[in-house]
Amino acid sequence: MAKKVRYNGGTESYYGCSDPTNLILGKEYEVVLSRDLCWQTNYTLNGVEGEFNSVWFDEISSDDQIYVAVSNELPVIGERYLCYKMEFVREQPKLIAWNTSRVQAINYLGNNIYQVNTLNSVYIVNVG
């Protein structure tokens, strides 16, 4: 199955790549080639000429992913959200620094707990 990504508006890169003005914010693209340059990975996209920095894209999965996270900041609709999501590494819980795609919806659940919806994921976040 081909890798699907969505352009998140990024424009910066460590190594040179193609001009992102041909990309459309929020549009889904199919990755036909992924080239690892050590400090940067470039994608070649189906139907778009050039190579583009992979951090300009958010991966798309077929189902929403749900994560538990903590943060010191309140989420803001339309902005990326810095939080620490919980993952299990060698069966031990670990907080991983994470920058989400742009926040689309926020639902306050009480006791400083927020449901933060992004393009592909839902984060249950304790803000403290």
Image (cartoon, grey):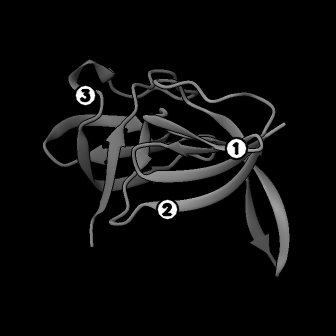
Q: In front here: 34 or 119? A: 119
Residue 117 in percent (x, y) is at 48, 44
Q: Which circle's residue, 1 or 2, is located before the other in the chain?
A: 2
Taking 4 as reference, is 95 left or right? right
Q: Nearer the viewer, mark 1 or mark 3?
A: 1
Q: Is residue 103 above or below residue 62?
A: above
Residue 65 - label: 2
Q: Which residue is mark 1?
A: 110
Above or below, comparing residue 95 to residue 8 in the picture: below
Q: Amino acid at mark 1?
A: Gly
User: Quadrant of the rendered structure where residue 88 is?
Assistant: bottom right
In the image, is 73 to the left or to the right of 80? Answer: right
- Rendered residue at 75%/28% (across/down): 73
Q: Position of residue 78 (x, y in %)?
A: 46, 24
Image height check: is 62 above or below 101?
Answer: below
In this view, the mark in front (1 or 2): 1
Residue on which disc 3 sits: 23
The tag earlier along the polypeptide, 2 or 3, is 3
Say which element carries label 3.
Answer: loop
How far separated are the C-alphas under marks 1 and 3?
39 Å
The image shows residue 62 at horizontal and vertical percentages of 32, 66
Q: Three-letter amino acid code at disc 2?
A: Gln
Alpha-carbon span between mark 2 and mark 3: 25 Å
Question: Foreground residue, 53 or 90?
Answer: 90
